[in-house]
Image (cartoon, rainbow, N blue to C red):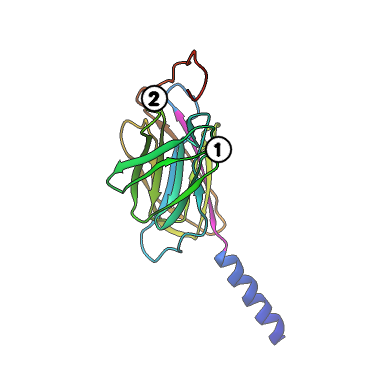
């Protein structure tokens, strides 16, 4: 009987530790899905676990990929050059100023992003290259896919849910309370500014000239 009671207590403890599920769908006023939006859950109280994974932003075909990357503060991002030309990656953003000068194809550099905030990436050689790294102070974050949807799992409790997108017209934040065993589904309509990304004109002399 004692062993059975201990087993029940262990099962209850495991269930209590199960993370709560948040499903979010983002769309425009026209009903179009919003991809590349970063959704994060900031706890109202308590410490958060340290970064567990690193992210990657590669250079390929004279573009950054992915266009938007999210990483927890204190986490590393690696920058592999999988292109056929040199790149000079840099950021002048307050959250992280750095540069990776003239590194050759096949090289890989890594940077630790220790402060929360937005980091805008550029290339001193290829002006049309741009990307964003969103550094969040929490391990509970996700990025929407092409369908405008994302899923997050976090311990039950009170959170501030924040949404970031490079074209978002105004900040979006919601106070939410996650309950054990009760998935939460949210749908939000975003107002987006026009996409002003520079488009690279075809070079008659060939790529990488």
Report the magenta residues as a range: 18-27
* Tag in front: 1 or 2: 1
| Residue 99 picture location, percent across and down | 35, 44
Query: From what the image shows, is residue 194 above or below residue 130?
Result: above
Q: Residue beneath label 2, please?
A: 197
In this rendered view, identify the residue nearer to me: 48 or 105: 105
Q: Residues within 10 Å of mark 2 (few under 14, many from 20)?
A: few
Instruction: Describe the element under mark 1 as helix, strand or loop.
Output: loop
Assign the magenta stretch its main secondary structure: strand
**In this picture, residue 182 sits left or right of residue 48:** right
Instruction: Describe the element under mark 2 as helix, strand or loop.
Output: loop
Q: Is residue 130 magenta?
A: no
Residue for point 51% across, 33% down: 148
| Residue 124 picture location, percent across and down | 36, 33
Nearer the N terminus, badge 1 or badge 2? 1
Q: Residue beneath label 1, please?
A: 82
Residue with the most extreme left position: 94
Total numbered circles: 2
**Mark 1 → mark 2, Cα distance in angstroms:** 22 Å
Is label 1 in contact with label 2 (beta carbons under 8 Å)? no
Q: Quadrant of the N terminus?
A: bottom right
Residue for point 57% across, 57% down: 181
Residue with the most extreme top position: 204
Q: Residues within 10 Å of mark 1 (few under 14, many from 20)?
A: some
| Residue 31 picture location, percent across and down | 48, 24
Image quarter of residue 166: top left
Residue for point 44% across, 20% down: 200
| Residue 19 picture location, percent across and down | 54, 59
Query: From what the image shows, is residue 32 above or below residue 172?
Result: above
In this rendered view, identify the residue nearer to me: 191 or 3: 191
**In this picture, residue 151 sits left or right of residue 38:** right
């Amino acid at each position: 009987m004692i062993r059975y009671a201990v087993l029940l207590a262990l099962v209850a403890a495991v269930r209590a530790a199960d993370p709560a599920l948040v499903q979010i769908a983002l769309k425009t006023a026209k009903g179009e899905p919003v991809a590349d939006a970063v959704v994060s859950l900031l706890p109202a109280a308590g410490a958060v676990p340290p970064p567990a994974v690193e992210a990657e932003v590669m250079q390929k075909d004279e573009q950054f990929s992915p266009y938007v990357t999210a990483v927890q503060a204190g986490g590393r991002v690696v920058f592999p050059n999988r292109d056929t030309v040199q790149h000079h990656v840099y950021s002048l953003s307050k959250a992280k100023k750095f540069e990776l000068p003239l590194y050759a194809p096949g090289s890989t550099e890594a940077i630790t992003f220790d402060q929360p905030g937005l980091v805008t990436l550029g290339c001193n050689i290829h002006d049309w290259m741009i990307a964003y790294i969103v550094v969040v102070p929490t391990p509970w974050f996700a990025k929407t896919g092409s369908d405008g949807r994302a899923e997050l799992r976090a311990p039950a409790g009170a959170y501030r849910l924040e949404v970031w997108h490079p074209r978002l017209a105004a900040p979006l934040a919601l106070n939410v309370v996650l309950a054990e065993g009760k998935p939460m589904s949210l749908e939000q309509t975003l107002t987006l500014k026009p996409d002003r990304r520079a488009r690279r004109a075809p070079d008659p002399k060939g790529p990488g000239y």
